[in-house]
Image (spheres, rainbow, N blue to C red):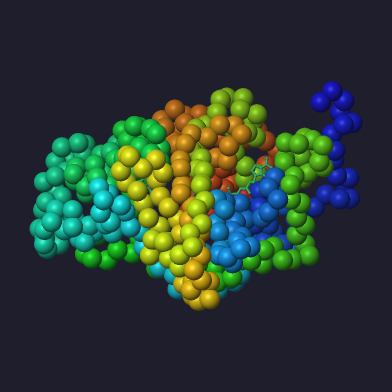
Amino acid sequence: MTDKQEIASPTDSELPDLVVVGAGLFGLTIAQQAAENDHTVRVIDARPHIGGNAYSYFDKQTGIEIHQYGAHLFHTSDERVWAYANRFTRFTGYVHHVYATHDGEVYPLPVNLGTINQFFHAHYSPAQAAELIKKQSQEGAGEQGAEPKNLEEQGIRLIGRPLFEAFVKNYTAKQWQTDTKDLPASIIRRLPVRLTYDNRYFSDTHEGLPADGYTAWMARMIDDPKICLTLGADFFDTTQPWNKQALVGRVPVVYTGPVDRYFDYSLGQLTWRTVEFTEHRYHEQDHFGTAVMNFVDADVPYTRSIEFKNFNPERKKIAQEPETVVWDEYSRFAGKEDEPYYPVNTPDDKRLFARYTDLEKDEPRVVFGGRLGNYAYLNMDQTIASALDTFTDCVLPLL
Ligand code: FAD
Ligand code: UDP
């Protein structure tokens, strides 16, 4: 860019009260709240659709709902978030279960009494299984009484070394390509371990999938004349009017893209994982008999397979058709051109992120949020909760 006049820019009269960069759940919640408080909003997204990573579409050939950026299951114990989400969609009664193929056998996950007894060819009671895990977690689980320092210590503490090596070590190596000693314990803290035969994947009070799909849910959130949407607009592209140079300082901005990108990677790049999918179509009514099959051994290069139609058994006609779509999920480090999906969060990343947070303070009327802006793994319910709080605490005072 050589000439300042080349930067496209909205006129003062075209400026809304608030610009939101990113039409994911964070940005849409902020926009919805602003409109509800009688403010005008412009939401932009670089992608050609709303919804961020929770976006889904209906496959033309089969009618199956495909979650384009990986399987998304809504679950929450936060009553405020549940009530908020229910304003815009009804949820199905879907309850998530995951199975894992290990050494030629299929086991239920998360690790529960069924997994333990199948693995050890035993019939342990809950107390016996607890005793066994205690014994098997004596080495490698870190200092007793202290917080586990990393994912490995956390994993061994939760399920003992043999189960950790069977179900976590290789899967995690495929998913993160980072030593389990350098990964934060928090990655698997959210996986429950149960000494009963209950193999619900989540333990939250509420769970389900949006009855008419994710995108319909999120479209209803911004169905308000005070909200304007511009898709296919990158905030850093100065040839389109809703760009950083034209807006920052003139109007409050909520930015939900990657924080290091915002500062042009001036302090360095945060590390992210990205995922890729390969699609298979089978002329079968049901390929796996479940929606998610994890492959926890090193010899299968992908982490898991998703059979989308099994998320929606209530769509009976589609469920009975002799066609199914399966996506195998591969994980790798993200380059600058890739979609950043999972923050790796090594100690170096944490230090770098803290330095970016210092830079944020000097940005006039810019609020950073969402999983990319906060460099944090946030589930959808946490994203909504964080957006509702951010709106009240940081955005509303700017409007
Ligand atoms: P995003 O959804 O990433 O939205 C950010 C938006 O900003 C994107 O649309 C992006 O295009 C846009 N953007 C970025 N940069 C720019 C720019 N320069 N200009 C314009 N637009 C820009 N959560 C659950 O609760 N349950 C699950 O089962 C679940 N599964 C997941 C599976 C995967 C593979 C992943 C990656 C995440 C999963 N999540 C799940 C988390 C969920 O996706 C997030 O909580 C949610 O998407 C966060 O919303 P967000 O708005 O912060 O970010
Ligand atoms: N995990 C594992 N084996 C499994 C499933 C999960 O080791 O079969 C670990 C892995 O480190 C993963 C983390 O648990 O990154 C969280 O898994 P979850 O399925 O909750 O996360 P998702 O990848 O769906 O975000």
Q: How many marks?
A: 0
Look at 41% across and 32% down and name the residue there.
Answer: 346
Q: Nearer the viewer, residue 168 or 90?
A: 168
The answer to whether 308 is drawn above or below residue 250 in the figure is below
- For the N terminus, which image quadrant? top right
Residue 384 image point, x, y percent? 55, 57
Q: Is residue 72 visible?
A: no
Residue 139 image point, x, y percent? 15, 37
Residue 255 image point, x, y percent? 65, 44
> Does 106 sit left or right of 14 as displayed?
left
The answer to whether 179 is drawn above or below residue 293 in the figure is above
Q: Quadrant of residue 175?
A: top left
> Does 52 sit left or right of 147 as displayed?
right
Q: Nearer the viewer, residue 246 or 8?
A: 8
> Does 277 sit left or right of 98 as displayed?
right
Look at 77% across and 57% down and name the residue there.
Answer: 228
> Does 226 sit left or right of 152 as displayed?
right
The answer to whether 200 is drawn above or below residue 376 in the figure is below
Q: Nearer the viewer, residue 173 or 263?
A: 173
Q: Quadrant of residue 98?
A: bottom left
Q: Is residue 140 visible?
A: yes
Look at 51% across and 71% down and name the residue there.
Answer: 321
The answer to whether 286 is drawn above or below residue 187 in the figure is below
Residue 273 image point, x, y percent? 48, 38
